[in-house]
Image (spheres, rainbow, N blue to C red):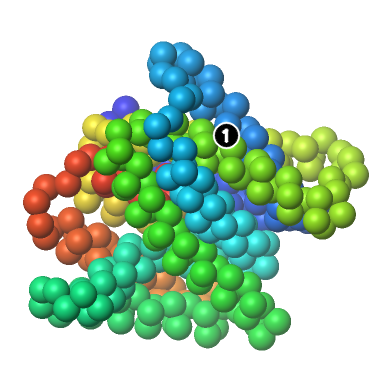
């Protein structure tokens, strides 16, 4: 398959994962869903590493530890937000990572007294946050505000996870190994959260079991499709197509969960998507050409 087709498939699978997370949250806590999702991903990546003849041994274990801490934290916050927000809203908040990346660049330039800040980048960040305000105002009730704050934080941590993925790529770590150790971190963190929350849930039947299995399978398949797309395709095209996940999530939310349709929220989603694409384009359009590993989206790992 071509890179654009793979990206559309990955976006669709991530949206399906979100559907399963929302449904599974009726039976399991966030920690338990994260644990099962990590376990399935770790097994799949271990098999893939063996098939490819790659070793699990790494020369940068502490980089993987830090990457897992940030990435798993983002994943937990995102899954928690999905359980309490309209699906498309939670998806949009997590997909704000390119906007956060642009904000990090602006903040770094200010603190270091470096080169002049691109005014288009500032405008892009402002537009992104205006879009978020437009989404949250009509989309969530007062009792859902906490879920909105959590979803907002998941996008920020996702941007930090992206920085760690970039650093690991520069260190020569293959994507499959990065995902494997991230999945192991998710399994461990999910287990700890589950135990702190009273232990494993009782048997809820085959439907509940199928939902958590689907979360892991959809997430792993989406990661593999996205990895391949970024390996063979144009990074900016791929980064733009990943936002189709928001559109898929919106359709699923309306059809399956009766999520409300607010024109202002839709306009906010369009604004966030546009700001994210513009931020990605501006960031990759400056400086020397980056290594393909540096173009992996944060969603690849979460």
157 with respect to 4 (left or right): right
Which x, y percent locates residue 103? 31, 73
Which x, y percent locates residue 36? 69, 40
Image quadrant of residue 229? top left
81 with respect to 1 (left or right): right
Q: Nearer the viewer, residue 279 or 259?
A: 279
Q: Residue at x 61, y 65 (%)?
A: 81
Image quadrant of residue 53? top left
Q: Residue at x 43, y 45 (%)?
A: 63
Q: Residue at x 57, y 34 (%)?
A: 41
Residue 164 in view, yes or no:
yes
Which x, y percent locates residue 69? 54, 53
Look at the picture and state if 3 lies above or below 261: above
Residue 13 in view, yes or no:
no
Q: Residue at x 32, y 27 (%)?
A: 1
Q: Can you identify the residue that label 1 sits on?
A: 41
Look at the picture and state if 162 lies above or below 267: above
Q: Nearer the viewer, residue 99 or 22?
A: 99
- Seen from this angle, which residue lies furthest right? 202
* Disc 1, SS: helix
Look at the picture and state if 263 lies above or below 240: below
52 with respect to 78 (left or right): left
């Amino acid at each position: 398959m071509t890179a654009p087709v793979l990206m559309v498939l990955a976006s669709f699978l991530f949206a399906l994962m979100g559907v399963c997370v929302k449904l599974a949250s009726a039976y399991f806590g966030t920690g338990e869903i994260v644990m099962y999702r990590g376990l399935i991903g770790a097994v799949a990546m271990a098999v893939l590493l063996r098939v490819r003849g790659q070793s699990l041994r790494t020369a940068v274990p502490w980089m993987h530890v830090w990457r897992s801490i940030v990435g798993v934290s983002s994943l937990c916050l995102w899954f928690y937000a999905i359980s309490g927000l309209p699906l498309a809203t939670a998806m949009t908040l997590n997909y704000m990572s390119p906007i956060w990346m642009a904000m990090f660049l602006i903040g770094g330039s200010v603190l270091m007294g470096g080169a002049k800040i691109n005014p288009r980048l500032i405008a892009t960040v402002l537009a992104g946050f205006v879009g978020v305000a437009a989404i949250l105002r009509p989309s969530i009730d007062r009792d859902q505000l906490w879920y909105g704050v959590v979803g907002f934080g998941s996008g920020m941590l996702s941007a930090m996870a992206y920085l760690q993925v970039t650093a690991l790529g520069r260190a020569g770590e293959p994507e499959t190994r990065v995902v494997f150790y991230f999945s192991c971190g998710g399994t461990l963190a999910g287990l700890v959260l589950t135990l702190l929350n009273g232990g494993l849930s009782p048997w809820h039947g085959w439907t509940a079991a199928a939902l958590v299995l689907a979360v892991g399978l959809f997430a792993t398949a989406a990661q593999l499709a996205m990895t391949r797309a970024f390996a063979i395709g144009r990074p900016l095209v791929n980064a733009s197509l990943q936002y189709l996940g928001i559109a898929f999530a919106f359709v699923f939310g309306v059809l399956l969960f009766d999520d409300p349709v607010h024109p202002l929220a839709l306009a906010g989603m369009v604004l966030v998507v546009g700001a994210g694409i513009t931020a990605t384009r501006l960031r990759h359009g400056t400086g020397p050409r980056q290594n393909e590993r540096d173009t992996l989206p944060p969603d690849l790992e979460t």
